[in-house]
Amino acid sequence: MEDCSSTHFILGNDYLIIYGIDLLKKKDRYFTIWDNKNQKFVFSPFKSQIKVKRVLPVNLELEKLKSEQSNKAEISLHLTDKQESKISALLYDHKEAFASDKEPLGAIVAHEVDIILNIERPYPPLLRRPAYPASPK
């Protein structure tokens, strides 16, 4: 069900009582909100169709990531909102592949980095070379 229009809603008795919906055709059809029975809201007399869209589940962590990274990230202006959300979802799904302040690249399991600095002789060939070439005399 992608998009649909609705002209009728089916409500249970508890909603009818809570919202004070008057189903009898007295003077006007009205509803009230909670215990405030003095203020009545009238249903509009004309028929209009209400567009109902499919509600997608919201991933709170993804929304938090978008809000935190929105000022740092530069996303192309040529992308549509749908394309931006797909990119954000893809980055969120593979977030383990990226380094962060709390988790540098060496902290990722199976991507450990061991760097050994050798300061003992014999030096590797690139370190034996002088930093600057000798000036011609």
Image (spheres, helix red, strand yellow):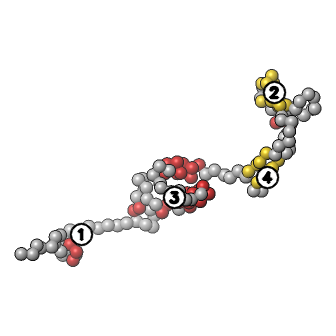
- Residue depicted at 45% across the width and 67% down the height: 110
Q: Which residue is mark 1?
A: 118
- Residue depicted at 40% across the width and 58% down the height: 104
Which numbered mark, 1 or 4, is in the foreground of this view?
Answer: 4
Above or below 101: residue 22? above
Q: Is residue 63 left or right of residue 132?
A: right
Work out how far the residue at label 1 is from the one at label 2, CA to CA, in angstroms. Answer: 83 Å
Q: Which residue is mark 4?
A: 4
Amino acid found under the numbered disc labelled 3: Ser
Work out how far the residue at label 3 is from the one at label 2, CA to CA, in angstroms. Answer: 50 Å
Task: Tell me where residue 21 sits by quadrant.
Answer: top right
Do labels 3 and 1 touch, CB within 8 Å?
A: no
Q: Is residue 16 visible?
A: no
Q: Which residue is mark 3?
A: 76
- Residue depicted at 26% across the width and 67% down the height: 117
Which numbered mark, 4 or 3, is in the foreground of this view?
Answer: 3
Task: Tell me where residue 105 sits by quadrant.
Answer: bottom left
- Residue depicted at 9% across the width and 75% down the height: 136
- Which label sits on residue 40? 2
